[in-house]
Amino acid sequence: MTFNKTLNWFSALQETDPAVYQVLFQELLRQQTTLEMIASENFTSTPVMQAMGSVLTNKYAEGLPGKRYYGGCEFVDEVERLAIDRAKALFGCDHVNVQPHSGAQANMAAFLAAGLQPGDTIMGMNLSHGGHLTHGSPVNFSGLFYRVVDYGVNPETGRLDMQAIADKARKEKPKLLICGASAYARTIDFEVFRAIADEVGAVVLADVAHIAGLIATGLHPSPIPHCQFVTTTTHKTLRGPRGGIIMCQEPWAKAVDKAVFPGLQGGPLMHVIAAKAVAFLEALQPEFKQYSTQVVLNAQTLASTLIENGVPIVSGGTDNHLMMCDLRSLKLTGKAAQALLEEISITANKNTIPNDPESPFVTSGIRLGSPALTSRGFDARAFEAVGHIIADGLQQKSPQASLIKRVQELTEQFPLYPELSPYFNPQDIQQAEALRH
């Protein structure tokens, strides 16, 4: 395959390692020609990717700005300070550490900073009800090292029952109360979680990885005034690079920094921190508020379209960027639904639903999200079309070839990274598409 060398991004890679180059080419084409519906994925801007692929990847910088264990850190200090200051402005937080490599490591840092010891009790949302592995799953560090009590959603409403959560907290007396989710479509009341924690002598960790972009733009209540620790990834609704940050109230600042380094990590990934800084600057612009507003509108449009076309949604809708489809009435498993959608170039992920009778490897649901397609420019009308395609595909109401064509029309209408398209040889694209199918 050939790539016009007037665009320098891939020319050296193509010459040095054609095999890896072709993988990148194929993945770019896959992203361009599919509908990306995975709620935890998004498309960064070109500047974010440029910062990621920069000379900062060469620099070790253990420590914090102004307090490093290596020389030559004057410029990486500057970029890390930019990331910190922008994150503070974006979320209105007292203190932020931008070094965690992921949301999971940010959560682990919060556990350490809170002073938890092995065997201490933590309380978080059950994974099958919408929680995350790091909220107490038995296969994760959070479930292996600590005594876990969990909470879930009301099986009738699909929503958190705060009274039931308070009753369990009074009984179990956790030292750490975790709120936030990876598959929960409704607004989270952080103030009530803090009140429960105060009553039982716990500290609160809010994991807002999925809704951080909505919080930053005022479209979801903020945990910052209420929770001692707040963690998030920097991709998903924030639309930055894959990574994490941890925020906290000032009394916990030194403990947080010490937990990240040397507690959990060595050298931070300075190229990723630079990309975080770029993403935070983008999120501080008025256009990002417009984007986030569209994310929510698009998700609500998709949910209502699916419901109207016979696809049930857990809790009956969404307040944020995602939704859970309950496939039991369609006689489908999540695994089968994921495969059906992938055959028509729609990417989604199987996901457990509350009180799921299937195993996590099969599931009775799929999770859908709006951030990635909204980044491509999809509006509510386009999401309505997406909803009809998904409903027809899951219920097999239309021929597969017809559904593929409808997807193709949408991807062509809303191109991804159009600045790269002129540099591809049309014959290479045709060859790659033939290989994919």
Image (tube, rainbow, N blue to C red):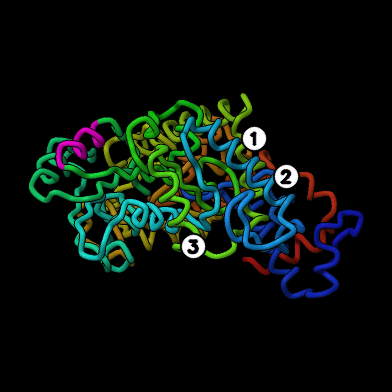
- List the residue tagged with mark 2: 47
Left-right relation of 25 to 250: right
- For disc 3, the neighbor class at 10 Å (few under 14, some 14 to 19, many from 20) is few
| Dot label at residue 262 | 3
Spatial CA distance of label 1 from label 3 is 30 Å
- Is disc 1 in contact with disc 2, using a CB cutoff of under 8 Å? yes
Residue mark closest to the camera, 2 vs 3: 3
Q: Earlier in the sequence, mark 1 or mark 3?
A: 3
- Residue 241, compared with residue 428, is above or below; it is above
Q: Secondary structure at mark 2?
A: helix
**Residue that appears at 56% across and 27% down:** 289
The residue type indicated by label 2 comes to Pro
Does residue 194 belong to the magenta stretch? yes
Quarter of the figure with the C terminus: bottom right
Residue in front for this viewpoint, 349 or 55: 55
| Dot label at residue 282 | 1
**Residue that appears at 90% across and 59% down:** 5
The picture places residue 281, in percent across and down from the top left corner, at 64, 35
The residue type indicated by label 3 comes to Pro
Left-right relation of 180 to 124: right
Q: Earlier in the sequence, mark 2 or mark 3?
A: 2
Examine the residues drawn in magenta and state their main secondary structure: helix
Q: Quadrant of residue 28?
A: bottom right
The picture places residue 211, in percent across and down from the top left corner, at 43, 39
Q: Quadrant of residue 179?
A: top left
Residue mark closest to the camera, 1 vs 3: 3
